[in-house]
Amino acid sequence: MIYTHSNYVKAPSTVIRRVKILWSGVRTRGRKKSTSWDGNICISKGKICHVEEVAFDTFQQGMTSRSNQTVRFRSSTSGDVDGFILDVDGPDDAVITFSSKVKSFQINLGELSEKPMVFEAGGVNLRVECSIQGAYDESEPYAAFHSECSYTDSEAVCDFRAYWVKVVQKNGQMAYSSPIFVDWIS
């Protein structure tokens, strides 16, 4: 990856923050590689106002119960990603606890940023990523469905170069472009 572009605007820390928690990976390579992540996410101060599921594969997986402080879930991954986007109303020192069969940890809400914090859990890419997801600029209709960006490849030294575009939606769904070929002009 050489460039990342986000359609989100930074949300002030005085408002409800969107906390994105994603987990992925498998224990081993080969058959029967599915990994069970059943567990819960809790917050010590404040409350969880809204929960959005991300990329669960079946109706048997996802949120099993919820309160203002806790989300319980059933999940398994086979190399794919599962997770939640939580709208959290809490102070910077609110502690988020992630507990599952694979990995458990605690982190202060104020420590999170748009850059994901990664908690490795062994296996083959077993990990949990936590970040703050910005908010859409709601003053522009359809802002969430449109994006523009530009990129200058300062390392391009050949006559012909291929680029690919990968789009990741907030729900974990992905789209990839075919190669885009560019002629390099000096």
Image: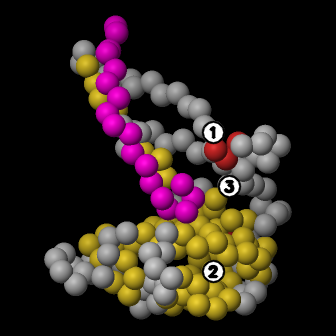
Residue count near mark 3 (Cα–Cα under 10 Å), binned few <14, some 14–19, many ≥20: some
**Furthest residue in direction top, as rendered:** 186
Q: Nearer the viewer, residue 45 or 141?
A: 141
Residue 90 circle label: none
Image quarter for residue 19?
bottom right
Q: Secondary structure at mark 1?
A: loop
Q: Marks 2 and 1, how far apart in space?
A: 32 Å
Q: Earlier in the sequence, mark 2 or mark 1?
A: 2
Image x and y of residue 98, in percent: 54, 83
Q: Hey, what amino acid is under mark 3?
A: Gly
Q: Is residue 85 left or right of residue 183?
A: right
Which residue is denoted by mark 1 in the rendering? 146
Residue 96 circle label: 2
Q: Secondary structure at mark 2?
A: strand
Numbered disc in front, either 3 or 1: 1
**Furthest residue in direction left, as rendered:** 30
Residue 162 covered by magenta stretch? no
Image quarter for residue 164?
top left
Q: Is residue 104 left or right of residue 26?
A: right
Q: Nearer the viewer, residue 1 or 142?
A: 142
Q: Which residues are magenta?
A: 169-186
Residue 180 covered by magenta stretch? yes
The overriding secondary structure of the stretch rendered in magenta is loop
Image x and y of residue 177, in percent: 38, 39
Image x and y of residue 96, in percent: 63, 80
Residue count near mark 2 (Cα–Cα under 10 Å), binned few <14, some 14–19, many ≥20: many
Determine whether 25 is above or below 101 in the image: above
Q: Nearer the viewer, residue 123 or 166?
A: 166
Which residue is denoted by mark 3 in the rendering? 134
Q: Secondary structure at mark 3?
A: loop
Determine whether 98 is above or below 15 in the image: below
Q: Earlier in the sequence, mark 3 or mark 1?
A: 3
